[in-house]
Image (spheres, rainbow, N blue to C red):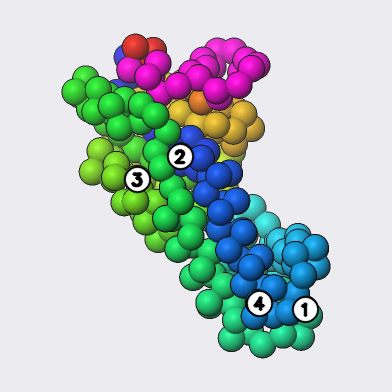
């Protein structure tokens, strides 16, 4: 019997891709206006910044999501003043948060699951401060009983440590928890490996590996649970 449902955030509860596109557009305009860097050159530097951050952090940890450090490394690499890094990070996150909207059906699905008496949690890669800000903007933070971030457990999905911590916080065995997410590798396979039920949120075509189930919309979730 399921007692808890745990959710990923990015591209699960809202479209990270759309919000990121808006934030990246603002960042590109900043680079062009303040750094005299054309869009193509900025794209190349941004990709390099991601590589540099993984090399410096060792990869597969919450630090790889730190925009401030990424922009710092980018500016250092091309010899530009690192004073731009905080402004770039603030611009990115402010624009992304402003652009966020919950997927249709998220609010009503969470309310329905709460009415069933289920414990609701968050299991997400990223740093806690940014993920709390996202849930506040989406207007759904009050529905959740706990959160586990990769920053907290020093491990990124699909590492089992994150899933085990979710089950521990829920006060349940792993097989009494369902995990809902958009990533086949990080969310679905990670949850299955940890002994949880897995629900793949995917509006497109395709099926997850059994015994995972798929939902195309959050309107389907309460009935499936």
Task: Please give the residue where the numbered disc 1 appears in the rendered image.
Answer: 77
Between the residue at mark 4 and the residue at mark 2, the CA separation in whole angstroms equals 30 Å
214 left or right, relative to 128:
right
Between the residue at mark 3 and the residue at mark 4, the CA separation in whole angstroms equals 31 Å
93 left or right, relative to 159:
left
38 left or right, relative to 69:
right
Q: Residue at x 36, y 26 (%)?
A: 105
Task: Please give the residue where the numbered disc 4 appears in the rendered image.
Answer: 33
- Quadrant occupied by the N terminus: top left
Task: Please give the residue where the numbered disc 3 appears in the rendered image.
Answer: 138
Task: Please give the residue where the numbered disc 2 appears in the rendered image.
Answer: 14
Q: Is residue 204 magenta?
A: yes
Decide if residue 161 is in sight here. Answer: no
Q: Nearer the viewer, residue 67 or 30?
A: 30
Q: State which mark lies toward you, 3 or 4.
A: 4
Between the residue at mark 3 and the residue at mark 1, the CA separation in whole angstroms equals 36 Å
Disc on the earlier residue, 3 or 4? 4
Label 4: state its secondary structure. Answer: helix
Label 3: state its secondary structure. Answer: helix
What segment is highlighted magenta in the picture? 202-222
Disc on the earlier residue, 2 or 1? 2
């Amino acid at each position: 019997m399921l007692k808890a449902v745990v959710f990923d955030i990015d591209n699960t509860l809202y479209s990270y891709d759309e919000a990121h596109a808006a934030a990246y557009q603002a960042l590109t305009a900043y680079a062009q206006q303040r750094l005299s860097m054309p869009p193509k050159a900025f794209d190349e530097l941004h990709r390099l910044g991601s590589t540099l951050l993984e090399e410096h952090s060792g990869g597969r940890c919450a630090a790889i999501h730190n925009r401030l450090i990424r922009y710092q490394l980018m500016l250092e690499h091309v010899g530009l003043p690192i004073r731009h890094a905080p402004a770039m990070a603030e611009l990115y996150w402010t624009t992304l948060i402003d652009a966020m909207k919950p997927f249709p059906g998220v609010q009503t699905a969470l309310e329905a699951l709460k009415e069933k008496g289920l414990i609701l949690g968050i299991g997400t890669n990223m740093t806690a401060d940014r993920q709390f800000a996202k849930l506040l903007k989406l207007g759904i933070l009050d529905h959740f009983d706990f959160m586990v971030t990769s920053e907290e457990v020093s491990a990124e999905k699909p590492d089992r440590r994150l899933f085990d911590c979710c089950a521990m916080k829920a006060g349940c065995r792993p097989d009494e928890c369902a995990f809902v997410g958009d990533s086949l590798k990080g969310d679905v396979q990670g949850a299955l490996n940890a002994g949880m039920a897995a629900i793949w949120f995917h509006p497109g075509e395709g099926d997850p590996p059994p015994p995972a189930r798929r939902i195309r919309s959050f309107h389907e979730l309460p009935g499936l649970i």
